[in-house]
């Protein structure tokens, strides 16, 4: 099984502020849906709480929490990374969709990362993506840059796989 991280990242590795994403780029949201639909996604409890309409449709949604009492509508709950991997052992690809804490814990076992690079440094950032050692990864796809017509932000896609 591929353990794939998918992330939108700014020039300095920023990924979030005040419980929200740094930007919403509609083309990127469509790509996220295309890539993840039909596959399980795992997220931290805080990222789950930031979803405007709760669990994402047509995907197994798995929420990581240390709280054994917590249930989230339409989601499977997991308390450890091992628990997540066990639930997904028959799947082809697991998508780790954030946020910062959950990227940190999955990074050592991740085999692929789908980056959306935003070519801008946001001023207000309180959540970052872990630093990766570029030598450990092959870049297998680059696309862009594109300009988002709504926000005017420049962005590009990159996929890397662990060597
Ligand atoms: N740019 C992007 O692509 C992207 C994607 C997703 C999210 N984000 C942003 O990232 C921010 C949220 O990230 P975050 O780091 O604050 O929170 P998070 O990773 O979404 O969730 C953290 C929570 O996950 C649970 N958790 C973490 N490690 C765990 C472990 N080892 N075992 C069991 N449960 C564990 C805990 O839940 P309990 O407290 O319930 O125990 C913890 O409070 C938001 O700003 C969001 O918008 C950005």
Image (spheres, helix red, strand yellow):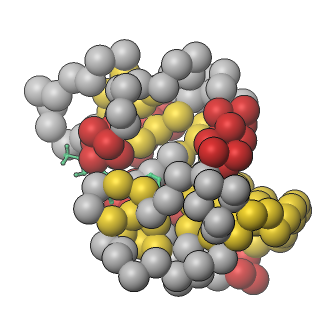
Residue at the spot x=29%, y=18% of the render? Answer: 73
Q: Quadrant of residue 127?
A: bottom left
Q: Nearer the viewer, residue 41 or 78?
A: 41
Q: Nearer the viewer, residue 5 or 83?
A: 5
Q: Quadrant of residue 128?
A: bottom left
| Residue 40 vertical placement versus 42 (above, below) | above
Q: Position of residue 26 (x, y in %)?
A: 63, 45
| Residue 134 vertical placement versus 80 (above, below) | below
In the drawing, does residue 151 fall left or right of residue 19? right
Q: Nearer the viewer, residue 94 or 1?
A: 94
In the drawing, does residue 118 fall left or right of residue 62? right
Q: Is residue 27 visible?
A: yes
Location of the N terminus by quadrant is top right
Q: Position of residue 95 (x, y in %)?
A: 59, 41
Q: Is residue 83 visible?
A: no
Q: Position of residue 163 (x, y in %)?
A: 80, 68
Residue at the spot x=64%, y=68% of the render? Answer: 153
| Residue 52 vertical placement versus 19 (above, below) | above
């Amino acid at each position: 099984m591929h353990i794939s991280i998918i992330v939108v990242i700014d020039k300095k590795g920023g990924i979030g502020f005040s419980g929200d994403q740094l930007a919403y780029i509609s083309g990127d949201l469509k790509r996220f849906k295309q890539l993840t639909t039909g596959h399980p996604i795992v997220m931290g409890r805080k990222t789950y709480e930031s979803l405007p309409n709760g669990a994402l449709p047509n995907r197994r949604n798995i929420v990581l929490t240390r709280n054994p009492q917590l249930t989230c509508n339409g989601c499977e709950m997991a308390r450890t990374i091992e628990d997540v991997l066990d639930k997904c052992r028959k799947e082809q690809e697991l998508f780790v969709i954030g946020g910062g804490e959950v990227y940190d814990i999955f990074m050592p076992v991740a085999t692929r990362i789908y980056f959306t690079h935003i070519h801008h440094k946001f001023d207000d950032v309180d959540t970052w993506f872990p630093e990766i050692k570029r030598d450990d990864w092959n870049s297998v796809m680059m696309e862009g840059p594109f300009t988002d017509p709504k926000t005017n932000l420049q962005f590009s896609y990159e996929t890397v796989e662990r060597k």
